[in-house]
Image (tube, rainbow, N blue to C red):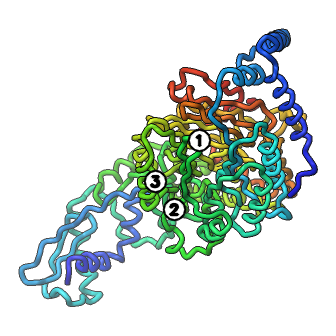
Amino acid sequence: MANKFRSIETKHYAERDAFFEDLKKLDRRAFMRVAGISAGIVAGMGLRSPHSFQLVNVADAQETKPRFSFAYISDTHLYEQKLNDRFVRAILKAVDDVNALDPQPDFVLFGGDLAQLGQASELKLGAQILKSIKAPVKMMVGEHDWFLDMGELWRELFGAPNYSFDHKGVHFVVLNSILEKDFWTEKKLTPMERMKIVAGLDNALQSRFEVGSEQREWLKKDLAKVDKKTPVIVFSHSPLYKYYKPWNFWTDDADEVQAILKPFDKVTVIHGHTHQLLSNQIANISFHGMLSTAWPWPYAPEGLPKLTVQMNRPDPFSQFDGCGNGRMDVLEAGLVNKLYNLWERNPITVRASYLTSGGKQDVPPRTKLPSY
Amino acid sequence: MTFKMKLLVGTGALLSFAGGVALASGPAARTAAPEVKKHQVPVSKDGDIVLGLCDGETTMEVDGVKDGQKMTREQAQRVSGALMAEWLKKNPDANWDPVPLPAVAQAATPPPPKNPEAPRSPPGVPRTPEKPTAGGSVVQGGVRPESGGKDVKKQAGAPIQDGHTYGAFSERDEAIWAASTQAFVEEGNRVFHDGDLLGSTVAMSCDMCHPDASNTHPETYPKYQVQLGRVALLRDMINWCIENPVRGKPMADDDPRMRAMEAYIYAKRKGTALEYGKK
């Protein structure tokens, strides 16, 4: 799918990126001058903005060097195009974004929920769109992809839902964490009825997500050969901790999975499903949520991790607000700085140091418009 | 004849009094029915049937009717009469009306307390307690067999304002009204979750962005909606969502779907302070 036509937003961001790329190329003295002028302008405009995106980003480029970066697109929830073009437009925008990254990410993680109802037309459309990503794509499965045919077509298109790989000294594990105990056989549900129940958040008709004992055994075996000092990054569609059960922002066997990850020094979990800026730290494990391209979820009424700085509530009048994609910068130390590329807003970075310091260092910009 | 069957026979024999007893015992509690005490009846030496009264105390042996035998209607009436006479002797304060009353339809047995984990359809809201002071839609307590006649007398003597038609409704009325309200809210729940009912042309429904009607903040309306450039009510925003992300046709103010969805959204924000104009 050639992307000959670009949206105004995409063009705007391309120009903006080019501008900041140029800034990075300045030598130190010139940088200080530009930074000084920018700060002067900012002060002159009466904006008190210590976290101003421009300054931080440029300073970043000179001060920290990530080992490598990867990007993500997640939770695209595609219907077939003739039914709903809204979500198709959103994934195309995200593909434009990651293709415009310079330097290119080492790979792009797809975070699950490619389809809305797991139908062949939806999954195949998604597969086709993802082919236009320049960098290699790592696939993860979400519950919306799975529960119509229990992952049959997904596996056919993308392979096994759980696998691991090593990349530049980091061990990556991809889990299928959206398995559920059978709630459909007894109720004699059709595959589509089952799919629609799982696709809904606020019904209590389904079971909770789990990794399951079989896959936990697989994980144990996979990690047995990994040195405890090797950084481990886990990709999971569900959060791998217990956030809010009524909406299935929840993994039932999260404690068991965390126990398996406990012996490792540096563990990061990147998860989808929650469609919001979401950060957590449990013992040795840092958790980062991913944004959706389709729609943002509100924050749950309870259970929000203390370290999460909420993103401003989205403008319902803008299709793209509160949505987006992002990038993970894997630091030399093996942890991850997570950049939330929120469309139509300044990006927000949640640093590894913010999480590991228990929220004391590098606090992300605070919320201006909290949830109701 | 087993113990269970004995109790069963006892209940059957007392059926002619059931209407009266039911009235005296008040409506059954809607949630968390009081635990029924086990009535241990003594075993007859001759192997006769022993019957227990529903007060949980009074028992009577039926001479000449062995375990496993069936009583005739006459025998049963004689026994139940004797049992009631025994009870009246124990409870002289009970204003027992011996004239059988016409049967009164009772509210249907309520469903067991809803466990949010339990399967239910359509995907729904937890029960809203309509009368928070009562903790349920029906006041618990009242006159029960085990409270004897004392409560009846107490209630009969208590001075209450009377002769006022407006307030002359019973707990049963309240139960019916609460159930009607809940049904209305449930209908809103259904519409909220159903793209077809909403008239969506792109298979979208409200719950996709607003699980449990979260982030609908009905308490903040009316307010100036900057993006619309005018003051908006909740229904204006519902219609905005229907027209835009859901891509359906806006609903008239008196559209039953609109009314039901408003009911659902307000029900989900129960307890939140009204704060019109909140940004």
Classify mark 2: helix, strand or loop: loop
- Amino acid type indicated by mark 2: Glu
Q: CA distance from mark 3 to mark 2?
A: 23 Å
Which is nearer the N-term, disc 3 or disc 1? Answer: 1
Pointers 3 and 1 in contact (C-beta within 8 Å): no
Which residue appears at 93% of the width and 49% of the height?
A: A5
Badge 3 crowding class, 10 Å Cα cut-off, few under 14, some 14 to 19, many 20 or more, is some
Residue position marked by numbered label 3 in the rendering:
A222
**Where residue A271 sits: x, y (%)?**
59, 46
Chain under disc 1: A
- Amino acid type indicated by mark 3: Asp
Residue position marked by numbered label 1 in the rendering:
A168
Nearer to me, A67 or B81: A67
Q: Tell whether B3 sits left or right of A255.
A: left
Q: Tell whether A54 sits left or right of B108.
A: right
Q: Is residue A195 above or below residue A312?
A: below
**Where residue B54 sits: x, y (%)?**
28, 67
Q: Is residue B163 visible?
A: no
Q: Locate the N terminus of chain B and report the quarter of the image it occupies.
A: bottom left
Residue position marked by numbered label 2 in the rendering:
A180
Q: Quadrant of residue B230?
A: top right
**Where residue B149 sits: x, y (%)?**
30, 56
Chain under disc 2: A
Classify mark 1: helix, strand or loop: loop
Which residue appears at 87% of the width and 41% of the height?
A: A10
Classify mark 3: helix, strand or loop: helix
Q: CA distance from mark 2 to mark 1?
A: 34 Å
Task: Say yes or no: labels 2 and 1 on the same chain.
Answer: yes
- Amino acid type indicated by mark 1: Lys
Which is nearer the N-term, disc 2 or disc 1? Answer: 1
Q: Quadrant of residue A24?
A: top right
